[in-house]
Image: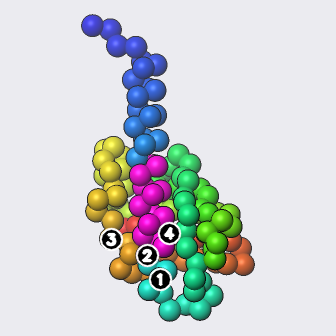
Amino acid sequence: MILDYRIIKLTAIMITSHIRQILGESLEYGLTKSIKKCPAPHITGFWCDGIILDPPVRENGVVQFKGLAFFGIDGQERYKVYLELGSYHKKKYELGRHLADELQLENSAEWYIINVEKKEIRMTIK
């Protein structure tokens, strides 16, 4: 049986795209929940209405995503997103597994840094 490489590649792209979509939705939910508990006055009342992640870049053993978040008081301001996966979640992502089930983001504010002036959100998931 001969497999068409193009079909395999397209299937892999569709799977990773789906995983990025689910990861973005989990980050959106976790960020909004976490911010509600955050005492920082400069982001009081902010919420996230969506995160779109570009395909990851692998550099020096680190998996990093860039993307766009709809964020702010009305959830519609555009913020640049930078996401870095630690070794545990990087391995799961590279194996094509969903990370959403294991993320416990809403209970801590230690996984993100929000720069309102630059409109940037930097996230690290270890």
Q: Determine the CA span between mark 1 and mark 3.
A: 15 Å
Q: Relative to residue 126, is residue 21 depicted above or below?
A: above
Q: What's the mark number on residue 36? A: 1
Query: In the picture provided, is 50 more to the left or to the right than 27?
Result: right
Q: Determine the CA span between mark 4 and mark 3.
A: 13 Å
The quarter of the rendered structure image containing the N terminus is top left
Nearer the observer, disc 4 or disc 2?
A: 2
Precedes in sequence: disc 4 or disc 2: 2
Q: Mark 3: which secondary structure?
A: loop
The quarter of the rendered structure image containing the C terminus is bottom left
Precedes in sequence: disc 4 or disc 3: 3
Query: Which of the pair 34/90 is nearer the observer?
Result: 34
Q: Determine the CA span between mark 4 and mark 2.
A: 15 Å
Query: Which of the pair 24/61 is nearer the observer?
Result: 24
Q: What's the mark number on residue 115? A: none
Residue 25 magenta: yes
**Measured from the top left, where is residue 38 in percent x and y?**
48, 87
Residue named by callout 4 = 123
Nearer the observer, disc 1 or disc 3?
A: 1
Q: What's the mark number on residue 104? A: 3
Q: Check disc 2 and give the amino acid type.
A: Lys
Q: Determine the CA span between mark 3 and mark 2.
A: 11 Å
Q: Determine the CA span between mark 4 and mark 1.
A: 17 Å
Q: Check disc 3 and give the amino acid type.
A: Gln
User: What residue is shown at x 28% (from left), y 62% (from top)?
Assistant: 102
Q: Which residues are magenta?
A: 20-33
Q: What's the mark number on residue 33? A: 2
Observer able to see residue 66: no
Precedes in sequence: disc 4 or disc 1: 1
